[in-house]
Image (tube, helix red, strand yellow):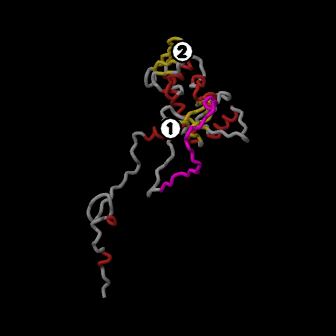
């Protein structure tokens, strides 16, 4: 079964601790059609062909973010076939949710979207939705996407202008003056020295939305064993770490060779 995947050309920028996607309106968006067996190589080849990219001078990086992710979390990069399958599962879920939404036009750019988790009023002119996601993340939520589709608008046109390059360039168009009276010391800053703790280190990889959903409601495969000391019969330690054993002669040292 074919899945429709909307690709938008741009770049991720980290500002004030939040990741924002700046859309390149010159190259715009494309609609990619993927099958259930599509691989990472197929997805990269589609993006290169649709955007007419030169592989000798330009590289393709595929990434996405979800509405339920915190703004300080980095985007999820697609670098393997497994992550492509996860992306297709997310696309399938979004398509199923889109089919359940019903749009009713109120007047002008105001719509009433019914279905999903809740019913919401969407104002495409003011770019607001009752769910609050549209005005907080500045990216259209599922209700706004359904309303924009019913109005015949492209999804890239209902994204807030803060994600555009024009807004980014306008922020640095004026002169930036240093603070008067502030002395800046020029020195090389090295990263802090962090000592590695004992034991096995925890995984630092960010898990995808699909991996987290699969882990909900499941117990650990292996339960930790409760150790009990053979001397004091208490839990939490073994015989070599027992405090009651200190000062006692061991059975090996108390044995004396005969003869």
Residue 7 vs residue 139, the one in the foreground: 139
User: Which residue is identified by label 2?
Assistant: 109
Residue plotted at (73% across, 41% down): 56
Q: Nearer the viewer, residue 62 or 49?
A: 62
Relative vertical location of residue 247 with respect to residue 225 in this rendering, above or below? below
Labels 1, 2: front one: 1
Label for residue 26? none
Q: Which mark is residue 72?
A: 1
Q: Main secondary structure of the magenta part?
A: loop
Q: State yes or no: residue 190 in magenta.
A: yes
Secondary-structure class at tag 2: loop
Position in image of residue 209 (x %, y %): 49, 37
- Write down the quadrant of residue 61 in the picture: top right
Q: Does the rendering let one see residue 30?
A: no
Magenta highlight range? 169-195
Mark 1 neighbour density, 10 Å: few (under 14) some (14–19) many (20 or more):
few
Task: Name the residue rendered at 51%, 46% in the picture.
Answer: 205
Q: Are marks 1 and 2 in contact (CB under 8 Å)?
A: no
Q: Position of residue 252 (x, y in %)?
A: 32, 76
In space, the residues marked 1 and 2 are separated at their CA atoms by 32 Å
Looking at this view, name the residue that lies furthest to the bottom: 259
Q: Position of residue 13 (x, y in %)?
A: 58, 36
Looking at the rendered image, the quarter that the N terminus falls into is top right
Helix, strand or loop status at disc 1:
loop
Q: Residue at x 52, y 11 (%)?
A: 107
Q: Please name the residue shown 55% across and 52% down the image.
A: 190
Q: Is residue 88 above or below residue 117?
A: below
């Amino acid at each position: 079964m074919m899945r429709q995947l909307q690709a938008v050309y741009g770049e991720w920028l980290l500002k004030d601790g939040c990741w924002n996607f700046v859309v390149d309106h010159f190259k715009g968006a494309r609609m990619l059609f993927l099958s259930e067996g599509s691989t990472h190589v197929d997805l990269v080849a589609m993006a290169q062909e649709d955007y007419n990219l030169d592989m000798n001078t330009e590289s393709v990086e595929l990434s996405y973010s979800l509405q339920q992710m915190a703004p300080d979390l980095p985007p999820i990069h697609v670098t393997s076939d497994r992550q492509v399958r996860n992306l297709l599962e997310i696309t399938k879920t979004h398509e199923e949710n889109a089919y359940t939404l019903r749009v009713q036009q109120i007047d002008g750019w105001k719509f009433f979207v019914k279905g999903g988790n809740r019913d919401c009023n969407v104002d495409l002119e003011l770019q607001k939705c009752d769910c609050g996601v549209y005005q907080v993340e500045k990216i259209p939520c599922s209700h706004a996407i359904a309303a924009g589709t019913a109005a015949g608008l492209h999804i890239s046109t209902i994204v807030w202008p803060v994600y555009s390059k024009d807004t980014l360039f306008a922020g640095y168009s004026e002169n930036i003056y240093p603070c008067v009276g502030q002395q800046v010391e020029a020195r090389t800053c090295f990263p802090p020295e962090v000592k590695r703790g004992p034991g096995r280190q925890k995984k630092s990889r960010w898990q995808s939305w699909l991996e987290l959903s699969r882990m909900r409601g499941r117990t650990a495969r292996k339960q930790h064993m409760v150790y009990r000391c053979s001397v004091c019969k208490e839990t939490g330690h073994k015989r070599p770490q027992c405090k009651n054993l200190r000062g006692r002669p061991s059975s090996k040292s108390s044995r004396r060779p005969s003869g």
